[in-house]
Amino acid sequence: GAGVSQTPSNKVTEKGKYVELRCDPISGHTALYWYRQSLGQGPEFLIYFQGTGAADDSGLPNDRFFAVRPEGSVSTLKIQRTERGDSAVYLCASSFGRGLGETQYFGPGTRLLVL
Amino acid sequence: QQPVQSPQAVILREGEDAVINCSSSKALYSVHWYRQKHGEAPVFLMILLKGGEQKGHEKISASFNEKKQQSSLYLTASQLSYSGTYFCGPELIYNNNDMRFGAGTRLTVKP
């Protein structure tokens, strides 16, 4: 079966622009996560969805970042007024459920470069 | 809440062994281990659950000390394919499936 997919694979934008990053989770997975990974660092938690609702958005760095999952499947991470410090790889992961011990499966990531 | 991993980096020859440690300041339900190769997504290796149950997909072993809130990953007779960065992701007992990954341990296996 298909894994987690993310589009675009690479995104170059200018400071101040708006970007949208898309994540398509594994079919049937109800939980979806967004992470940000800077060079040489581990994935940094941003937000977690259970179904359509954001169960935990405590990792979003500020109000320029927003994510939605309107139908409980595909999710979009939206970044307004991008800054150079937003440059990173944005990873999406999904898991079958919310329970403790559920394995998260990662997508290939979107490499965002803000010039 | 971010766990502490050690060492930060290790270089091995093929066939040598390595241990990677992960410790948390909070009570844990489980610890997940992932490996990430350069330019690729993290890939699940193993999960260790409270109570001792261990689930994994590769010939890599691990331990989980609930009292000490620590986990160790054991790579024995390392192969070239083991090279990559290893991350631990502890699940806190009171934070369902909300993982904060460690900074990673970079493992390089040389021929």
Image (cartoon, grey):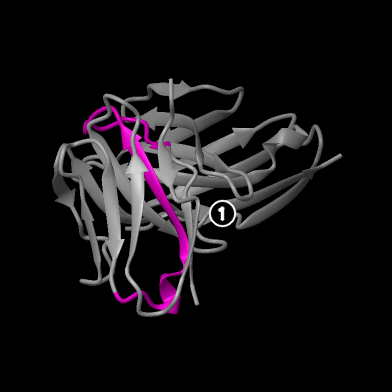
Q: Is residue A94 magenta?
A: yes
Q: Is residue B78 left or right of residue B52?
A: right
Task: Pick the residue in front: A25 or B45.
Answer: A25
Which chain is indicated by disc 1?
Answer: B
Classify B91 as above or below A110: above
Which residues, given as a range, are shown in magenta?
A81-105
Quarter where residue A45 is shown: bottom left
The residue nearer to you, when weighing A65 against A15, is A15
Q: Considering depth in this image, is B39 or B106 the residue closer to the camera?
A: B39
Residue A58: which quarter of the image? bottom left
Q: Is residue A21 left or right of residue B37?
A: left
- Picture coordinates of residue A36, whole percent (x, y): 40, 58
Dot 1 lies on which element? strand
Give residue B69's position: percent from left, percent from top.
37, 45
Q: Residue flagged by tag 1: what amino acid is it? A: Ser
**Residue placed farthest to the right in the image?**
B111
Mark 1: few/some/many CA within 10 Å (<14, 14-19, 20+): some
Q: Is residue B32 magenta?
A: no
Q: Quadrant location of the N terminus of chain A? A: top left
Residue A60 is drawn in which quadrant?
bottom left
Q: Is residue B54 left or right of residue B75?
A: left
Looking at the rendered structure, the number of numbered marks drawn on it comes to 1
Q: Which residue is mark 1?
A: B6
* Picture residue at 26% right of the left edge, 24% below the top: A28
Q: Is residue B66 visible?
A: no
| B51 over A92 or under it: above or below | above
Where residue B28 appears, x then y in whole percent?
30, 42
- The image position of residue B55, as x and y in percent, is 44, 22
At 60% across and 34% down in the image, what residue appears? B74
Q: Residue furthest left?
A: A53
A97 and B64: which is toward the camera = A97
For the question of whether residue A66 can be seen, the reply is yes
